[in-house]
Image: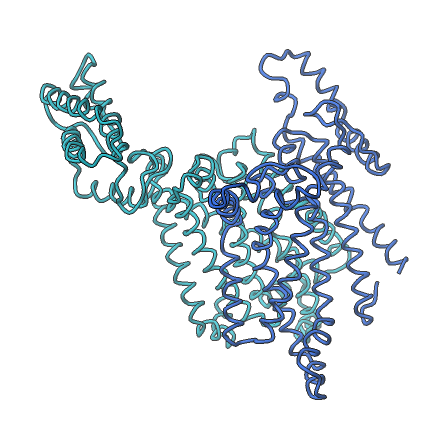
Chain colours: A cyan, B blue
Amino acid sequence: MSAIGKMMATREAQKLWRNKSALLAIVVIGIYLLTALFVMAGGITRDTCDSIVGSNKLPGFFQQDSPEKRYENATTKFLSKIKRALTAEDVTAALKEVKLGPYHAADKSPAELETLVAKIDTLAAELDESPNLDIDPSILPKLAELEAAESQLKAPLSPWEQFVHNASVCLGTDSQGRSIFFRGIYSIKIAIQIGLVTALFSVALGAFLGAAAGYFGGWVDHVVVWIYTTFSSIPNLVLLVVLAYAFTNSAAKDTLLPVYIAFGATFWIGTCRVIRGETLKLKEMEYVHAAQTAGFGPIHILLRYIIPNTAHLMLINFSLLLIAAIKSEVILSYLGFGVKNQPSWGIMIRDAGNNGDVVGGFFWEIGFATALMFVLVLAFNILSDALQDAFDPKHV
Amino acid sequence: MWAFVIRKLVYNIPVYLAIIMLLMVLLRQRDPVAGMLGKNATEQDYINKREELGLNVPFFVQYGKLVKSIVTLDFSQKVWNEPGVTVGEKLWTAVPRSLALTVPALAITTVISIFIAMLSAFYRGRWIDRLLVFFAVLGMSVSFLVYIIFGQYFGAYKLQQWVGSPVFSIHGYESGIWNWPFYMLLPVLISVIVAMGYDTRFYRAVMVEETQADYITTARAKGAPQSKVMFVHMLRNAMIPIVTRVMITLPFLVTGSILLEEFFGIPGMGYVLLSAIRNNDFPVVEGFTAVFAGLFILSIIATDILYAIFDPRVRLQ
């Protein structure tokens, strides 16, 4: 850590701080990190993501559904729950149980609710006579009346609940009526978590093995090169999928552990190669020879002289691996081998593809997931470029 | 040179053995038999099936068998999920389909990106260079999935609606050279667009490195025309990294693109592999990986040799 601190005070680092687009990228990444922390602290839970907040495939930006769909929403979802509760044995208890998204049954007597339901039924029967609500503007006042009656069945929301509800539908809902906005934001945490864990692990492992192989040479070098040649000779996707798939019967199958292991096992190779090459160069440096002559042990030399001088390469690789992890997570989740039982951008894109959203011209879900991912990956790409320009300008 | 090749080949034998071992160990974390038999199987059925698949013998016997069949280039094992088909037949039908997609994609991408990279390096630091680099970074930041989904939607589905008749296939495959544009051109274009960002940036970095070399200054100083400096002096010297990059991607041509093949319903190698892993069809995964790893190792050796041919200063050791 102190090595990174020192690095940030050098002349090369000042080149980085002067780069405006890099600073902007850092700010963007900071916002994503804060959002991920907010989600981790319980700001958005898995339950929030899975709860149904409205009709399915509701368009975003508070657009209204088509009249047909409005009619269907007002006469089925909440109404049918109320109707069922009114026919139950213990009506008051059953009414208390009624819940749809943030809505509960209004605090009215069963008799009052009965009259409202009857009113809705008559209005609905009148609307049924119109062959197609979508092309008949004359029914709109009646539809509004129907919706007003239906909303009286619901207990009014507190301002906070109203705000949360508005936020949840601000970008529409997916094919099951879940909030696209909350699912997309929750996925930030998944992406950042997978990115950080795998990038940290891969860089640490790659740097350790690479520096050891480069410094000691001999059989250590042979073993390390042998291991990474082996891993890189298996098609990457086969290795990722087989690794992720090896866990399907274990207790860890619903956690992120298979993803971590699959990425960790494949991502360290690039870092290891780079650090090994750099170490081969560094160990011929005069200060390393001086340290050897002064009688320092190899561990001391590695930790004190070699590894700190590869910190810039580690930082660049870390940034590149984060991008790789985030992008690979989306593809693995899409194929069904990655994240399970919780939202992720890959799952959102898969849902949008499988449920005919794209073919039907409904781009809210795939669009939001793509936009969030695009901005994050773009920020990391710009940052990696700036890091490379500043610390490793000769890199090809 | 032959001494180098033989030494490299011998050196890679343990690597190759380890690849097969690693893959077999990983695959055997799962039990394929239970899934094949269904719920009503008896204990005896289970034992019989394991024996039929050859899973009842100790691991190292299975390992030895596989290594032996690879060494003798014998791919006549039966595919588990399709009766009567051998692994060799499966590979032989699937690989050409993948190649029909990946080879044109690689060729087009390489030519176009080298051209753009030279343009970018030539105008280095000017607005045209910045614009090209900016677009490359933008292009790299969009997920592959999104390119495919929208490429398929606009390129196949919407275009079909506008034109009135299908221009590109949305899903499906037929072999034959005349069917190629209908089924493959759109996936190839998508794959070119995806790869272009990465390749352009890489080749630009190579070219920029070359523009700073002394021989370029010399060539300019002696009055060589700009085009000659670019295309003769620079391009030839930039060939080493270009060849390395192309050579390294060659083995990956046979794996195909799982995502493209899945979306466009092309039964190529990526598609076959993915379904083999999903259905625990061990012989297919093992046979294919054995072939791929062999190609990969050979291409690395070939890259080293090409290096020496392009650059006489490089010594093979």
* Position of B216 relative to B85 (above/below): below
Foreground pick, A69 / B129 = A69
Q: Tell me which residue sits at (64%, 21%) in the image.
A: B36
* Position of A148 relative to A307 (above/below): above
Residue B39 occupies which quadrant of the picture? top right
Residue A3 visible in the current orientation? no
Name the side, left or right, on which B50 lies relative to A106: right
Residue A140 occupies which quadrant of the picture? top left
Mark count: 0
Name the side, left or right, on which A222 lies relative to A47: right
Find the residue positioned furthest to the right.
B3
Q: Tell me which residue sits at (66%, 81%) in the image.
A: B226
Residue A312 visible in the current orientation? yes
* Position of A382 relative to A201 (above/below): below
| Residue A10 location (% of width, % of height) | 50, 75
Position of the C terminus of chain A, as image quadrant, is: bottom right
Q: Tell me which residue sits at (54%, 71%) in the image.
A: A389
| Residue B314 location (% of width, % of height) | 80, 68
| Residue A125 location (% of width, % of height) | 19, 22
Name the side, left or right, on which A314 lies relative to B69: left
| Residue A321 location (% of width, % of height) | 55, 55
Foreground pick, A221 / A352 = A352
* Position of B235 relative to B268 (above/below): below
Find the residue positioned furthest to the front.
B164
